[in-house]
Image (cartoon, grey):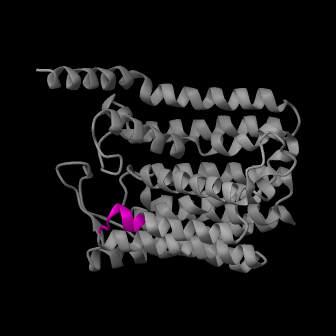
Amino acid sequence: MEFIMAMGSAGIAYGVARSLVPLLITIAHRFNILDCPDSGLKRHKQPTAYLGGVAVYAAILVSSIGLLSLDARAFFLIAGVTLLLFLGLIDDLQPQTPLFKFAGQAIAALCFLRGGLDLKHEFLENASLFPEIGALGWSLVSALWIALVTNGFNLIDVMDGYAAVNGIGAALLFALAAFFSGSSDVIILMMALCGGLYGFFKYNKPPAQIYLGDAGSLSVGGLLAATPFMITWGAKGALGICLPVIILAIPLSEVMMLIIIRTMLGIPFYRGSRHHAIHFLRDRGWSVEQILIAVGCYYSAAAIVAILFFSGSIGQNKALCAGAAIFLFWLLLVYGPKSANVAFSLFLRKEQQTF
């Protein structure tokens, strides 16, 4: 029965997204809600519709309302995701200041925390690895996690299909973890996200006809940020709570590496630049399709580790080491060949300042 409901959730969401996207493409072109190429960061060939995130959101909402029990936690989850959707939509229509977007994300994080989606509940159950820092401390740590994942997912939405494939991969892994922990609502929710993103991906794959836009990347990122708080990670061992970091390693590494690289090069961390992971790979001759396949391989490897861990085939230490190795391989694949060039650029900058 649980399998049927999960597949039904994915199917409903897929149908809704697949039906809405063509209409939203037409609306976006009619009202000029487009991402237009320029001579800088945006190098796609023609103006491309935003509003893809609206289709994904609608798909998740229709599927979830039909299959989930709507309690207080679900209400605040929906409220936070909805707020992020409208925050991103406003930015898609008229670019806003970083302060405005930060304030909106902070309110959305408060919605999640108000619904009990934080580190004080399921996330740390049976995990005694961390000291007690009080309710306020855990709330602040939870808010930081939400901000990192939400913005990380927003930052990876820079190439045809890239954010969608990452979202599908992360959602499938969370659904897998929820299956082993007995969280049926999370399975249905994540399968709805998978279905919605896959229906959207049909039009977002290269060459993309529509993008998620900030409305989609922020709302999907916020949903993925809150999902780990609904799964009991510590039941299989204290280090099990590290698995969400591995599952969301690509968006998390994106935001952290961009902060480091831009700071090293004297660029404000909130200002756009061609230092995203996909830019490094594209500059080395990787095609869009090859990058998407590499991302798929990352999530497939992580899924194998998760299955082995949750089924008891390997212990938590081996699972953590395997997950860390997969994460490290991704970092070296993307940033290894370029790290020397960044360091050299920094050295030249310092040398020029001495003369």
Q: Quadrant of residue 258?
A: top left
User: Can residue 266 be seen in this snapshot?
Assistant: yes
User: Which residue is found at the position 33% from the left and 22% from the top?
Assistant: 343
Q: Is residue 80 above or below residue 141?
A: below
Q: Quadrant of residue 118?
A: bottom right
**Identity of the residue furthest to the left in this view:** 355
Q: Where in the figure is residue 299, as x and y percent of width and height?
A: 62, 41
Q: Is residue 286 left or right of residue 44?
A: right
Q: Where in the figure is residue 284, as x and y percent of width and height?
A: 34, 28
Q: Quadrant of residue 15?
A: bottom right
**Frontmost residue, 73 versus 57:** 73
User: Can residue 277 be seen in this snapshot?
Assistant: no
Q: Is residue 69 left or right of residue 272?
A: right
Q: Quadrant of the N terminus?
A: bottom right
Is residue 98 rendered magenta in the image? yes
Q: Where in the figure is residue 58, as x and y percent of width and height?
A: 55, 76
User: Which residue is found at the position 43% from the left and 23% from the top?
Assistant: 336
**Frontmost residue, 270 versus 32:** 270
Q: Is residue 337 above or below residue 15?
A: above
Q: Where in the figure is residue 302, as x and y percent of width and height?
A: 67, 37
Query: What segment is highlighted magenta in the picture?
Result: 95-101
Is residue 97 rendered magenta in the image? yes
Q: Is residue 332 left or right of residue 190?
A: left
**Frontmost residue, 258 versus 338:** 258
User: Which residue is found at the position 83% from the left and 44% from the top?
Assistant: 127
**Frontmost residue, 181 versus 168:** 181
